[in-house]
Image (spheres, rainbow, N blue to C red):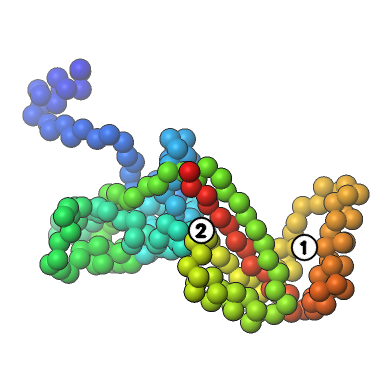
Amino acid sequence: LQIIEGAKKFDVAIIPIGGGTSAGIVGQNLERLLNEKGFTCGHEPDSVEFSTLGGWVATRASGMKKNKYGNIEDLLVHVTLITPQGYIRRQCQVPRMSSGPDLHQVVLGSEGILGVVTEATIKIFPKPEVKKYGSLIFPTFRHGVNFFREVARQHCECASLRLVDNEQFSMGQAMKIDDGSLFQGLRRKMEKLYVTSWKNFKVSNLKNEEVPLSLDP
């Protein structure tokens, strides 16, 4: 009540908003706040712990789950850009406008050259009830590429697909945390024996495919 009375006294307009945040929010914090309400933005670049919503727009960012949710250009609904000459604002157009050019395409990827992104509205989605992750091993990089092509051809909706080469795969194996248990050590030895002896994969050629899945309600 005091805020309303003060606004009336000083002739300040009050614009109600149901919820939101600034373009400077860090991606990790944005996702955490959305998750608490049962939603997700679906945008998860490698720099999600450090990058901001406005930074995603300015760099035309792509996320690891873009197969399901799209890149930032697919999520962006509204944007405000502050320039030395004033501001540029692109409101959500309903119905769709057939005239152009689309201002979003000017702002996206501008890298701060044209101005600073101060406001951005993006689409959000219901948080998946289940998340599952899988890992596949291919004997060669070519086998992994062929797998990618088959997934694309059959329109499989995996949230993310990532093919890593032997060097990165070996590093990932070396950085695995071992709980020191006899069972864990035996399991890892059996896995290696199965791949190298039973499947006859050459360790120097192994490639790994990570397949995260998001299952909606």
Q: Is residue 72 left or right of residue 155?
A: left
| x and y, in percent, of residue 48 in the image | 49, 53
| x and y, in percent, of residue 150 in the image | 55, 74
Q: Tell us which disc is closer to us: 2 or 1.
A: 2
Q: Amino acid at mark 2?
A: Ala
Q: Residue at x 48, y 43 (%)?
A: 217
| x and y, in percent, of residue 99 in the image | 12, 67
Q: Is residue 138 above or below residue 58?
A: below
Q: Nearer the viewer, residue 62 or 12?
A: 62
Q: Say which mark, if any, is on residue 154.
A: none
Q: Nearer the viewer, residue 120 or 36?
A: 36
Q: Amino acid at mark 1?
A: Ala
Q: Residue at x 64, y 67 (%)?
A: 209
The residue labelled by disc 1 is: 174
Q: Is residue 81 left or right of residue 202?
A: left
| x and y, in percent, of residue 126 in the image | 42, 43
Whether residue 82 appears in this view of the structure is no
Q: Residue at x 87, y 61 (%)?
A: 190
Label 1, residues with CA under 10 Å away: few <14, some 14-19, many ≥20 = few
Q: Extreme front residue here?
A: 154
Q: Nearer the viewer, residue 111 or 75?
A: 75
Label 2, residues with CA under 10 Å away: few <14, some 14-19, many ≥20 = many
Q: Nearer the viewer, residue 204 or 60?
A: 204
Secondary structure at numbered mark 2: loop
Q: Residue at x 67, y 62 (%)?
A: 135
Q: Say which mark, if any, is on residue 159.
A: 2
Whether residue 100 appears in this view of the structure is yes
Mark 2 and mark 1 lie on one chain; the one further toward the N terminus is 2
Q: Say if mark 2 contacts mark 1, CB within 8 Å.
A: no
Q: CA distance from mark 2 to mark 1?
A: 26 Å
Secondary structure at numbered mark 1: helix
Question: Which quarter shows the N terminus?
Answer: top left
